[in-house]
Amino acid sequence: MSESHAYVVQAPAAVLKITLVEVDKLYIHEEIIPRILSWLAEKIVKDGVFKDPIIVDEKTLVVLDGMHRVAAAKELGFKYIPVCLVDYDNPNIGLYAWGRVVRVKEAARAAYKDPDSAERAIRDSLSLLGYRLVRAASLEAGREALARRELSALLVFPSGFLGAKAATRDIKLIYDGIKRVEQVLENRGFEVGYYTESDAVDLVSKGEAVAALIPPTITKDEVRSVALRGEVFIHKATRHVIPARPLGIDVPLDWLTGRYSLEEARKMLVDHLSRRKIKRLPPGTVLDRRYEEELYVFES
């Protein structure tokens, strides 16, 4: 894309191209959760602007971050959406898995009075779903088996590590299976939360969770392949860490409706951003959440 159609930020580890694209030309790679979609659509209307661009692979238009904002844009009838185009093949763009942290629901505390009973229930749930459970010698050994796809998940308990083997090595089917595990655990009195792998393991070691389930990390090629064939992974399948992230572009919603041609709307966006100052914030900054990447915040 020519620089006249995008506002370009030359960050040290990545080039960020902020522009508008047609919503219908994007490919999402994770499923949409209706309650999140509904809340987000209402928030965008209330804000009166589209605050932050979604992160998109420039080569394929696969959405890396912002699935629900794409769905909200469609729900609101927008023709265009603000994006930050990146080179997904840039090795500085990290792709990781989300750890699943398992806790006992308040209502089920009496049923699981000790960690052993909770661990047995989790093991039984996976066995009933057809997983074969094998002992993992260590966390590192489990991670290596996940990377080779010898395991479909690694279970971290206070008592040690178990590998869960399924009858497939297809990454899409592996994650579909993890969704079924989450549903069964919810029905048996557990709640599942999402954390980085290291945080998930730490919570178990501190006694703040009864187990953690670590899935294999999806590759960038697998993200593209699944999205481009019109399929989606489950919610919280990928955790992308971009070296730098633009925030606060505050695009007026009227520019997204199709009232203007795409070329006109893009020019308006570039002019809009060119008049604003950029504040750089370091990784670890907490705004609406904690950001792992450097931030480029556009200020009025």
Image (spheres, grey):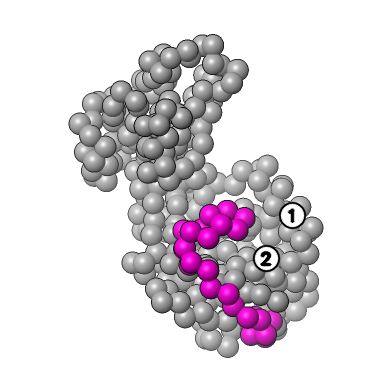
Q: Secondary structure at mark 1?
A: helix
- Disc number placed over residue 51 in the picture, else none: 2
Q: Residues within 10 Å of mark 1 (few under 14, many from 20)?
A: some
Please provide the residue range marked out in magenta: 271-294
User: Which of marks 2 and 1 precedes in the sequence?
Assistant: 1
Toward the viewer: 189 or 133?
Answer: 189
Q: Residue at x 41, y 21 (%)?
A: 122
Question: On the picture, is 223 further left or further right than 36?
Answer: left
Q: Can residue 35 be seen here?
A: yes
Q: Residues within 10 Å of mark 2 (few under 14, many from 20)?
A: some
Query: Callout 2, which amino acid?
Result: Lys
Residue 58 rendering spot, x and y as whole percentages: 47, 71
Q: Is residue 14 above or below residue 268?
A: above
Q: Is residue 118 above or below residue 258?
A: above
**What residue does disc 1 label?**
43
Please identify the quadrant where the C terminus is shown: bottom right
Q: Can residue 61 be seen here?
A: no
